[in-house]
Amino acid sequence: MSPRRTYQADVLARHARQRGDRVRALTGADDNSLKNVLAAQAEGVEVQDMATT
C-alpha cells in the first residue's frame, strides 16, 4: 500500500472513530490483481494458490 493510501485510510478511520463508529483495518494480498492473475497463469496454477503461498 502506498504511503498516500495509508494516510487517506488513517484520516477516514480517525473521522469514523470520532463519530463513534467501530473501525477495523484489513490488509492483505489482492487475489484478483492483474499482476497476480498473470503470474498464476504463467505458472499454470490457480490465482488463490499463488496468492496464499
Image (spheres, rainbow, N blue to C red):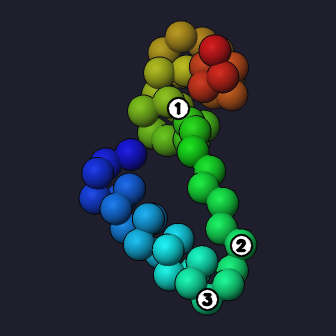
Q: Is residue 52 left or right of residue 35?
A: right
User: Foreground mark, 1 or 3?
Assistant: 3
The residue identified by callout 2 is 22
Cα separation between marks 1 and 2: 33 Å
Q: Secondary structure at mark 3?
A: loop
Amino acid type for the residue under numbered disc 3? Arg
Identify which amino acid the numbered label 2 is placed on: Arg
Q: Which residue in the protein does label 3 denote? A: 19
The image position of residue 35, as x and y in percent, is: 42, 33
Q: Position of residue 24 (x, y in %)?
A: 66, 60
Q: Which residue is mark 1?
A: 37
Which of the two discs, 1 and 3, labels the residue nearer the N terminus? 3
Q: Quadrant of residue 23?
A: bottom right
Q: Is the residue 10 above or below the residue 20 in the image?
A: above
Graded by Cα atoms within 10 Å as few (under 14), some (14 to 19) or many (20 or more), the crowding at tag 1 reads: some
Identify which residue is drawn at 44% across, 65% down.
Answer: 10
Local SS, label 2: loop
On the image, the x and y values in percent for residue 22 come to: 71, 72
- Kindly state the secondary structure of the residue where label 1 is placed: helix
Kindly identify the amino acid type of the residue bearing the numbered disc 1. Answer: Val
User: In the image, 19: left or right of 34?
Assistant: right
